[in-house]
Amino acid sequence: MKLVIGNANIYGEKIVDIEITDGVITKIADANSLKADVDAKGMIAIPGLVDLHTHLREPGREDSETVSTGTAAAARGGFTAVHAMANTTPVADNAGVVEQIYRLGQESGFCDVFPIGAVTQGLEGTALAELGAMADSKARVRVFSDDGKCVHDPVLMRRALEYVKAFDGCIAQHAQEPKLTVDAQMNEGEVSSVLGLRGWPKVAEEAIIARDVLLAEHVGARLHICHLSTAGSVEIIRWAKSRGINVTAEVTPHHLILTDDSARTYDPVYKVNPPLRTQEDVEALRAALADGTIDIVATDHAPHPSEDKECEWSAAAFGMLGLETALPIVNTVMVSAGLIGWRDVARVMSTKPAQIGRVANHGQEIAEGQIANLAFIDPDYEVTIDRNETASKSRNNPFHGMKLKGRVGLTVLRGKQTYKAEWL
Amino acid sequence: MKHLLSAADLSKESAIEILDTAAELARISDRPVKKLPTLRGRTIVNLFFEDSTRTRISFEAAAKRLSADVINFSAKGSSISKGESLKDTALTLEAMGADGVVIRHHASGAAHLLANSGWIASSVVNAGDGTHEHPTQALLDAYTLRSHLKNGQGDLNGVKVVIVGDILHSRVARSNVLLLKTLGAHVTLVAPPTLLPVGIENWPCEFSYDFDSALKGADAVMMLRVQNERMNAAFFPSTQEYSRRYGLDSRRADLLGKNGIVLHPGPMNRGLEISSEVADGARSVIVEQVTNGVSVRMAVLYLLLGGESSAE
């Protein structure tokens, strides 16, 4: 089967026609030299995006999202692969559950789903899950995380880091010292003091990151830090990398654009964990993403049904949607702002997350002979985000009504169009 | 003004209007028949998700003296214990045709949510939301301060007020800081550092860890209730130590200016944050605060709900 996409601007560097045959890029030719099936005029082409941090909610919370709806949302956002977090019900802490999620992903067909395994049994933080069994399963798990909870026991964290070395695994830490954040609701600072909402201090994140980079150095293991949110965390990661510690870090789109000021509305759509921080933190995160201290952008896409958000702030669930708005946000705050180029977008949203996840055939250079996993974005279009224009089952979109730059036009997974915009 | 959610909603003019209205309404409390027909036929719901007999009674008395129909709705623990959600409660009240809702809730922001969610059309009065605000308490405190220190007129320009205790968890302190600043008073907060919120340096007031020096020459001191359970969370080592460092006894009360007064929003922990000698002493205006609470709440309900109906 053949698909020719014409006039695509690859990496914003060169306008070409791309010919795909049976899922493989078979020709990259001069613009207007091939007969195009789809005209991508004005659009940037980058490798299909890879999310290292997605909550698909299935099994257990199919009222908020399923593998099918979540991956459809991913395709609309330009993603060709997502890593499904382990905090499902039952928890993805054994080979059976991770294989089920993997299979559901294959059946959905919208993007590849790579399950993340829990570090500890039931996410309880007391005993290691069968990490090896998940690694050896059909799902080939390489990333392990108790995300939503921190692996706070230092001995358990050390053992997990050591143990996964046997199969080139990686521990993705949700850095949150639990005793410093009991009932915490939002960033601890000026705004929390005025609103009377219990504070989530930055030190609760930074203290765990500092501990874990030292543990990773000590045992020579691979550590990934989930959703880094503070300027202080950036400093610790920068220091760790300068020492040669094998640590990578992610930032979410929402931490790149929103601040704790939005909590003044008491609208729980802005309630997320780790919490939105200050403008100073936002600036530090953008700079760190630009200079490579932060390796990747990951969405932490966290769907919730309306009843978990239409309530008092302290009773509401943590989390916000992210898959469909990630690329417009990165385009708006990073590319349009002149901090990075499209090569960098490809690196932080595709190549590097694929490497951290040890995922083959994603995040590859757009070149002849490569598997055709691609995303196309119209970078200059100003879009007003509408929470109802989504493939997700949930509507907890904090960007509703916000003006962002850029919209995804086409997503291609192994030569198949998994999303094509109506306007294209 | 449609709602009263935060003391920050009040301009100096509107705050003084409430205090002046309260002063007028206070006069009918001296009459044998303590009732005005102003809110006849209107329904006010006291929606209390948290026990607070004194605040509920105060609002109930205020509404009844204005001839409103009062419904007391106690929904303690409702949403968090997986009972009815705030949304469903609000929709129920809306369907019943409540004109005003007085809400007390354990969650900060609950009053704000109720007023801005679109679930109900009625006016909302915040009667205390979590550790956020309690604006009618601040109004009654301002009324009390004004009647003693400013002959019951105008603003509180130049009045020096010290607020002492668990500032971190106190909605009374938050509302007072905002309102007293609006009225021109000078506020100093006093507490052990553990009970002052991070970010307090940006509040429109001073703060100190040293009670004695803050008290010297002040016109008023407001003592906040300190809950015993704070000790278990290591906010302070023992009630005895707290009492020694931050409790108000006669020696300290005499550091106040000559006519300095002592306030407490109640209920008091006698012997912990305040000694009985001071609570019952000549400087104490604590019982008067309760009386003023009814007048101030009458004024708030009158100004929020009274306008339209009086035109009928």
Image (cartoon, coloured by chain):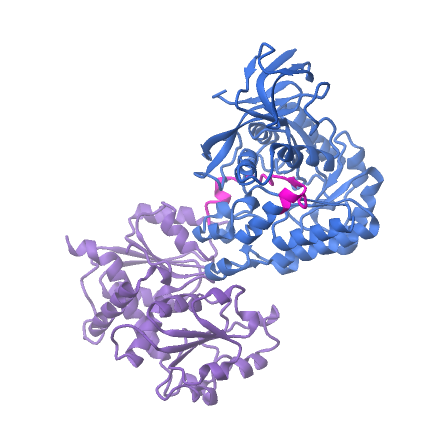
Chain colours: A blue, B purple
Q: Nearer the viewer, residue A222 or B43?
A: A222
> Looking at this view, is A184 or A208 the one in front?
A208
Query: Magenta span has A308?
Result: yes
Place of residue A137 in the rendered image (x, y in percent of width and height, measured from the top left): 78, 32
Residue A30, by quadrant, is top right
Q: What is the quadrant of the N terminus of chain B in the image?
A: bottom left
Relative side of A420 to B132, left or right: right
In the figure, B257 relative to B116: above or below?
Answer: below
Whether residue A193 is visible: yes
Task: Tell me if A217 is positioned left or right of A28 in this view.
Answer: right
Q: Image check: A331 left or right of A26?
A: left
Q: Is residue A176 visible?
A: no
Q: Residue at x 32, y 56 (%)?
A: B3
> Is the stretch drawn in magenta largely helix, strand or loop?
loop
Q: Position of residue B27 (x, y in %)?
A: 20, 74
Direction left: furthest residue: B312
Residue found at x 55% / y 73%: B228
Disc count in the image? 0
In the image, A165 versus B132, the foreground residue is A165
Residue B58 percent location from the top left of the image:
33, 68
- The residue range painted magenta reads A288-312
B245 left or right, relative to A91 = left
Give above or below for A23 relative to B112: above
x, y percentage for residue A421? 51, 23
A353 is within the stretch colored magenta: no
